[in-house]
Image: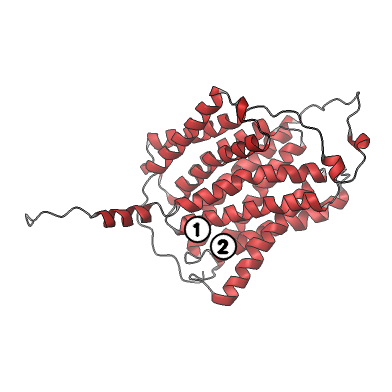
Amino acid sequence: MSGELIAPPTRNELEVIMSKAFAFLPFVLLTIICWGNYGVLMHHGKELMGDALRPFVGVGFAYFAIAVLVPTALLAMKGEKGNWSRSGVILSLLAGSVGALGALGVILAFSFKAKPIYVMPLVFGGAPVINTLVTMAMSQNLEKIKPIFLIGILMAALGGAGVLVFKPSESAKPAKTAEMVGVDASETAPSAASIEPALNFPMIAFSVALAVLSWGAYGPVLHKGQMKMGGSRLRPFLCVGIAYFFIAVAIPLLVLPLLESSGQWNSTGMAWSLAGGAAGAIGALGIIYAFNFGGKPIFVMPLIFGMAPVMNTFTTLTENASWGRIEPTFIVALLITIAGAVTVLIFAPKPAPAPKPSTAGN
């Protein structure tokens, strides 16, 4: 071995290394912003249209426009690296299906009279755990998991739950839904004899479990589908859109006439729902780009699930002008979430070099 000293990297070389190492972070941030506001947008759509399935249809239409029509046009005009493959299509369709089923699980929980204050902490707390288990099972990477990484996931999950549990209570606001959709307010006002029905805990548990399992599996399955299509970005996204359209549009439109729903279609509620669907679709595209720029599901998805509820809470506080009611417990939960997210990022298992993306149409 030569005794010659190796020169340390220059400042420019370090900047290049760091930019490549963290190139996926802007796309993670994009998804956090989009998915963090998804619930707020969908809540407006649900209030205005009176039930859960109608805004869900709006989400499906937005996915169809953003995740099907746009990728199809771009692929036809200028193409993209990668290729179609049978296994890649199946995995990407599966990812889109579990994404849509996760959204449906949340809406079903609300339909069974559960409250977002404990539904969303359960979903955002459980999904990263499922994500990690699925990722480790698919990559056979169990031996590289270190305790501090698991602690980071637990901190992000518990902190995200705490942010929602301890968020400031909303001030009472006059109901506007009836006026906005042209319904007599007296018809929608609860009677003095109305009593909140007992919670259907088995169905609420089933709905939350559906959301946790589905959203937890979304990232790893999508990443696998992308790799099976040569690292393509648009092809797996298109498959996600097709699956979402089928589950969120075709099926609900068939089911709605069979239900005795008090809801009604209206343009304002649909606009909010389309905005929610657009946020969901753009967030899904952000995940694909995060994977394409070096991010791995085992730390990308915990970061998103850890920080999305924080984004949701910030938007809610701003919308309701309730920043003055922040309690110390909320600040503590927020700091725990951020610390957990950073821990996940720094101590994520380093996988072995992956083989080159498949180019065979298997």
Q: In percent of the image, x 67 and y 48: which residue is there?
A: 101
Circle 2 sits on which residue?
236
Q: Nearer the viewer, mark 1 or mark 2?
A: 1
Task: State how the image is colored.
Answer: secondary structure
Mark 1 / mark 2, whichever is N-terminal: 2
Residue placed furthest toward the left:
3
Describe residue 340's horizontal placement relative to residue 250 as left or right.
left
Q: Could you tell me if residue 247 is visible in this image?
A: no
Residue 144 numbered tag: none
Circle 1 sits on which residue?
289
**Looking at the picture, how far across and down is residue 346, in whole percent?**
38, 42
Q: In percent of the image, x 57 and y 47: which residue is there?
A: 33
Give residue 151's quadrant in the image: top left
**Looking at the picture, how far across and down is residue 43, in whole percent?**
72, 42
Badge 1 vs badge 2, beta-carbon distance below 8 Å: no
Viewer-proximal residue, 219 or 179? Answer: 179
